[in-house]
Amino acid sequence: MVEKNETKNEEKKSISFVEQFVEEDIASSKNGGKIQTRFPPEPNGYIHIGHAKAICMDFGVAEKYNGVCNLRFDDTNPSKENTEYVDSILNDIKWLGFHWGNVYYASDYFQQLWDFAVWMIKKGRAYVDEQTSEEIASQKGTPTEPGKPSPYRDRPIDESLELFNKMNDQDSIEGSMVLRAKIDMANPNMHFRDPIMYRIIHTPHHRTGTKWNAYPMYDFAHGQSDFFEGVTHSICTLEFVPHRPLYDYYIDQLKEYKGETDNIHDNRPRQIEFNRLNITYTVMSKRKLHTLVDENLVCGWDDPRMPTICGMRRRGYSAKSIRDFINSIGYTKFDALNDYALLEAAVRDDLNAKSCRVSAVLNPVKLVITNYPEDKSEEMEAINNPENEADGSHTITFSRELWIEREDFMEDAPNKFFRMTPNKEVRLKNAYIVKCTGCKKDTNGNIEEIYAEYDPQSRSGMEGANRKVKGTLHWVSVKNCLPAEVRIYDRLFNVENPSSDERDFRELLNSDSLKVLTNCFVEKYLVEKKPGSFLQFQRIGYFTPDLDSTPNKLIFNRTVSLKDTWKKINK
């Protein structure tokens, strides 16, 4: 009996608190046991990894409990929204591996919301306020001091109805009027102090054009949209905790408006809040991300340094690695700052299992195998992925002249330098053991060429060729390689938590977050690889072809280094 209880407790611990709430509702047959969630992005920018956390929860809960997750665009502010963002959000959610039941828009409900607002005015529960936004803000009070009522709070219902209709006219003036709910100016919850329900915006809407000039506020549209769609669990981030009572208040009003007065607290969406995702060395504020793009501080929304999903995809992150990272940090009721290294570790774990191993030299110096025939070349077998035999192999051409990494040679090396140095042997990966015989320098003392002799009996795979040497180097053939540009990306900011720093966040940008290497060489096999391919440049890191890469100009982005070197460098 004790063992059964322990097993039960372990199962409880293995699910998130959000899932526990969902299971409680299923057990009590709330909403008839139906599970319906939604992901409600505002189409005013590209979604980032913070949104991915919400996506994993919203879609994950629906999938786990045999429900449905719908996608609803919160398009209530046409001045910031457009179809470009809609299309990008659809694409990013698909790429992450999730599928929605239906696609909805808050604009689908504009007429219903308008009619509901008219009903609230007629009930004396809403009024048109002609004060400026500054005047309204000054009357809000503080959490410990009550607010002051608007001089328009008790205006006649007919007058508010007339003005509300004028708010939707094309000749109305933005900022001249708002519709406010008439609730309680002394309520300790500031959101109850006559919140704004509608404001005037004359920017044409990306779906409704110029039909509407008065638009609902998020707090007024959000809960009602959930209710219209039959959402059972409205899962959102912690900043919406103080909004929850207002969310429920509007739904109470809506149920009364629709005549649903019985069991008013049963058939309603249940709002559950979890901690939002914050990561070191980046920002999640959409306003700041807009600034980075608009001021050309980065190269667009899909810049590989950006925390956007499209940026991470272009950098070479896999969808699975992002989901694995989110699952590893979990969901709590407390905000935290997650180490960027945890995300990179998840990327390494996934890419190690799926990346094709290839040879690339980023800082080349020529190695000449002096006893290898000048007119000879050999095709060496290279295993694509030692983690997965089914990935097969490809060939790489070996010849007399090779490119190796400049850092792999040292003329006067310390004892523990196990790479190339005079009179010592190293193995050239997939090829032969060679012994360095010397080097050639220019007039400034820089190494121009390195010389070595190979052992013809030491080819990889040959019988008796497995004698041990301490160093193994990667290489590409001078005559059988391709030039490439390689972009090395790093943290976008220099400080761990730029969002909490009092300085202008522009001043905190890492000037070394992008280094472009133009004198690189890669094996010819890479001309076949397309953007989205997962590659490991052996001994260097994980890479992917950039979207701008062509067969005539190969460009690769570093996804992540083989090991975390950031902390070591920045101690």
Image (cartoon, rainbow, N blue to C red):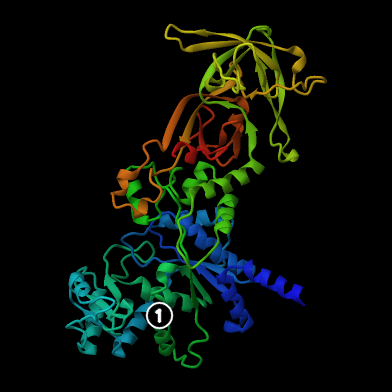
* View extreme (right): residue: 463
Residue underneath mark 1: 245
Q: Nearer the viewer, residue 102 or 59?
A: 59
Residue located at (59% from left, 14% from top): 367
Residue 3 placement: quadrant: bottom right
Image quadrant for the N terminus? Answer: bottom right
Q: Amino acid at mark 1?
A: Pro
Residue located at (78% from left, 23% from top): 461
* View extreme (bottom): residue: 262
Q: Nearer the viewer, residue 262 or 257?
A: 262
Residue 255: percent from the left, percent from the top?
A: 44, 87
Using a 10 Å C-alpha cutoff, classify the residue at mark 1 as few (fewer than 14 neighbours), some (14 to 19) or many (20 or more).
some
Residue 61: percent from the left, percent from the top?
A: 59, 68
Residue located at (57% from left, 18% from top): 403
Residue 104: percent from the left, percent from the top?
A: 48, 68
Residue 142 placement: quadrant: bottom left
Whether 119 is drawn above or below 309: the answer is below
Whether 60 is drawn above or below 45: the answer is below
Residue 295 appears anywhere in the view: no
Q: Nearer the viewer, residue 312 or 75?
A: 312
Residue 309 appears anywhere in the view: yes
447 horizontally vs 502: left or right: right
Residue 410 placement: quadrant: top right
